[in-house]
Amino acid sequence: MIAKEIRTKRDFCTFYKIPEEIYKTNTFYRASEYDITRLLVEGPSAFHQHATVHSFLILQEDVVVGRFALIHDQKLPEYVQVSFFEAQPGLSGVAKLITKKACSGFPHCKRMVIGLNGHLNYGAGILASNFGEAPVFGLPYNREYYQDYFPDFRKIPLVSYRFPVKPFIEYHHRIGNHPDFKGITVRKLNKMKLRQETEIYTFLNNACFADHPFWAERNVQEDYELFHPFRFLIREENLLFAEKDGKPIGFFLWYPDFNQLLKGHQHLGLKHLLRYYFTHPMDTFRFTEIAVLPEYKNSHAVQAMILSAIPYIQKSGITYGEGGFIFGENTNSIVMTRRFLERATGKKMEPHRHYALFETTL
């Protein structure tokens, strides 16, 4: 078995088509990561200004049986990231093959992490549960055996929580009867000024998540390249900003589960956009990110943003929400999320899906 580095357009096409073979009989797979994969693997993009990407096909007896990309980001200098990994079952020596390529390509790096796709904003995690249901948009999906390829690596668990919307809304109405939010106001994204609004989002991301595991500082162009392709799907109410005296202090990013518009290997296109606007068939939204600046942690900003989103969630007819991934080591966030959801639902909450990153020294 060998790893062949991609050099030609034909190789790139093969790289992108590998999931079609691996998931050809799987009804739960969604190809919604395709655009991000192309953006990072082939580029050019703002990410490539500070990151090096080498992509490989895994061949066994001249047959393509898998793929992976090695990414080194100068803003996360210690790590080689193994991204967009896909492989057929029953292969021997996959981890050894990838490690060898990482050591030879990036001899100055001390560690390697499997399952981080360039940046947390682009995607992270190898799915470790719930293989019998389609993923929520922006969350990973893979075959059950993927985690078995890295048995000697340190497993870094991540989880996501799913909750019914009705008690969630009722709870926030009960606790939201403040006479005011002490000067905190909430406004929607202005899509006519997407570039300027992205600057605010990037500033808040970097300020709020600077100490988060595997966080690397973002620049505006990177986030703009991420938002711009989805400008027709994202509504202005899907990104809310909390402000105090005109200063942005927090944000709430949420959106419907666009994966419910897709089947199998379809890519989001015009027909899906029309279906979204005219029939709105989704029953789930992704509670993607909510954060406030450290100095406003004890304010009512989070509550104000959620209350502002609720009328739009209700209008959409959505019945379930699912959060983004939370690192298992982030016990404060897990305790807060569980307490929050248990108060709303009156039921004990356990993670709905489990994911993992796999880390090792080089």
Image (spheres, rainbow, N blue to C red):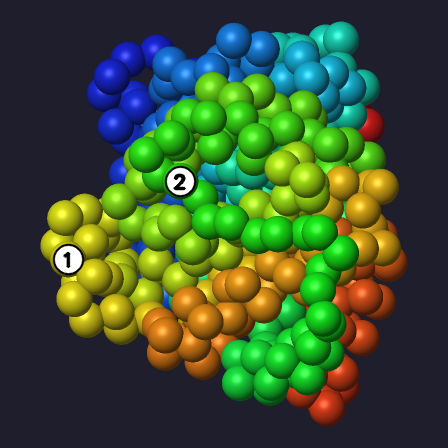
Q: How far apart are marks 1 and 2 (CA)?
A: 22 Å
Q: Give amino acid for label 2.
A: Asn
Which of 131 and 211 lies nearest the eye of the viewer? 211
Q: Residue drawn 54% across and 42% down?
A: 123
Residue 243 left/right relative to 315: right
**Residue 68 visible within the image:** no
Q: Percent position (x, y) of residue 362? A: 78, 22
Q: Mark 2 points at which residue?
A: 190
Q: In this view, does 121 lie above or below 283?
A: above
Image position, residue 39 (x, y; %): 38, 26
Q: Which of 21 and 237 is in front in this view?
A: 237
1 vs 2, front mark: 2
Q: In this view, does 337 lie to the left or right of 59?
A: right
| 277 left or right, relative to 207 | left
Residue matched to label 1: 274
- The amino acid beneath tag 1 is Leu
The first of marks 1 and 2 along the sequence is 2
